[in-house]
Image: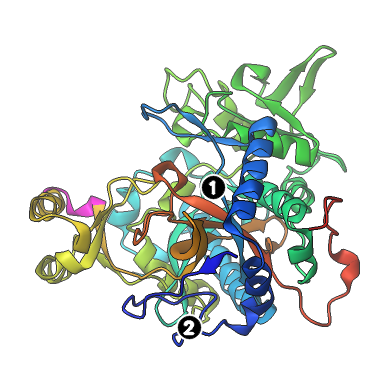
Amino acid sequence: MAEFRRPDPGIAAYDEAFALNGEVRPLYAAIVKRFSQFDTAELRRRERVIEEEFRRQGITFTVYGDARGTERTWPMDLFPRLIAAAEWREIEQGLTQRVTALNRFLADIYTGEGAAIADGVVPGWLVRSSDGFERNAYGVSVPHDAHCVIAGIDLVRDAQGQYRVLEDNLRNPSGISYVIENRAAMTKAFPLVWEDHTVEPVGQYGRMLRTALESVAPTGAGDQPLIVILTPGIYNSAYFEHAFLAREMGVELVEGPDLVVDEHVVYLRTIEGLVPVDVIYRRIDDAFLDPVSFRPDSTLGVPGLLGAMRAGTVTVCNAVGNGVADDKAIHPYVTDLIRYYLGEAPILPNVETYVMWEQDQREAAFERLDELVVKPVGASGGYGIVIGRDATDAELAHARAQIEADPRNWVVQEVVELSTLASLCDDTLEPRHLDLRPFVITGDRTQVFPGGLTRVAMQRGSLIVNSSQGGGSKDTWVLAPEDASREHLRSPPPGPRT
């Protein structure tokens, strides 16, 4: 039978499934019992079945610059993550609060009076010097001030079990397609494990997103606005997700040449002629959206798109310029922005972050750089991060020199010993560090999608969970409240009962 290796008491991390004394937490009692009944060979067999199904369906992700090849099958660990209903309610409230404040901030910067800057909540120079700040977005209004229709907020759980916000992703957050595909794979591979729990469904994402996109259509778009997804094309790392979402929402997946702007109106080229477009869910970065207003060498975007946005004939989601609000340098100020715009105490605290342009914080960080995490504010995917305790003296000296040369573009954070959860490694189920990316959808209201993408560092002791650097994923089960009606819960698809 499969063996669960208990967490090492010497590791200061909260384990999701086991208490400090090694006892199974009640939330995980049923699933640990089920998995204990499988031998390793059977778990590996089911793992291969899932991997082959993912490969057959083309459920992949891309790693650029890797000698082993760019396209890989999406990695999913078999042991799911569980979140209790009451715990999820607090997460949901905290995410709603946070994204609401961030949308207010974006509206304040681009179409408001810049009140938060004027009142000293966030430094104006910091906003204007951000790579994500876009002057072309000035005066471009968005229905319901929903500058960020789709947000992915990265959460980690500290040694005390407290959820903290590690990063905000407000431009083109990816991963939702894998959330849905992970669920389909788990319910087929482990139907009896699934039936032990009452889990919130995930199949409604396409409907939720389409409803939100319809709600931000321009005035006069009618009851059935035309929505398209704008993709850079098949060579983009997230192309699988672009195609997946187009199918889920029942909308067209288009590339730049499929659209044309005439008299400040965006049209879709069809065999029947030009059809006006109301909403564009773009998966292209700001700089490539419109060669007239941004990079003139871009062949991915649509000439004249910004003019149509200014004219109010089309809504582009997420809005241009959102990167200023998910700049890692802005992260330390978000809790203050919540207090400023909403008059509320933040529900979800930040990971403690130090800004390197403040001399006292920089000097304090340098004194204990070997205990902290150094991050470039503009990088993603785990690249450029230096984890002090794992770094050599030369690497720490290099990080210090980079900070001194350009303090605006670096932050330093306290190490959070990410929570751990059993994952299939070799012949045992061993604790591995993980995080959580829930998705928040805003149209005429803000909703949090139940669950999210749990990413897991499959290397023992590693805190880097990104799939591009060897990480995997887990299905995330948000348990329904005990009094919830089962009518809204999706039954698992038919499969072998084992």
Q: Going by the image, does 290 lie left or right of 229?
A: left
Percent of width and height locating residue 349: 44, 75
Which callout, 1 or 2, points at the residue further toward the start of the chain? 2
Instruction: Name which residue type carries label 1.
Output: Pro
Q: Residue at image x 63%, y 62%?
A: 476
Task: Say which quadrant the C terminus sits in.
Answer: bottom right
Specify the label residue 306 is tagged with.
none
Q: Is residue 419 visible?
A: yes
Distance from label 1 to label 2 (Cα)? 37 Å
Kind of residue indicated by mark 2: Gly
Disc number lying in front (1 or 2): 2
Q: Which residue is mark 2?
A: 22
Q: Is residue 17 covered in magenta?
A: no
Left/right placement of residue 404 relative to residue 139 reads left
* Residue found at x 73% / y 52%: 189
Whether tag 1 and tag 2 are in contact, CB under 8 A, the answer is no
| Boundaries of the magenta span | 405-409
Horizontal and vertical percent position of residue 118: 37, 65
Helix, strand or loop at disc 1?
loop
Residue neighbourhood size for the residue with mark 1, other residues' Cα within 10 Å, grouped as few (<14), some (14–19), many (≥20): some
* As drawn, 287 above or below 49: above
User: Residue sitting at 75 percent across and 55 percent down?
Assistant: 187
| Residue 311 can be seen, yes or no | no
Q: Secondary structure of the magenta portion, mostly? A: helix
* Image position, residue 141 (x, y; %): 60, 47
In-front residue for pair 195/428:
428
- Report helix, strand or loop for mark 2: loop
Residue 408: percent from the left, percent from the top? 22, 53
148 up-or-down from 248: above or below: below
Q: Which residue is mark 1?
A: 173
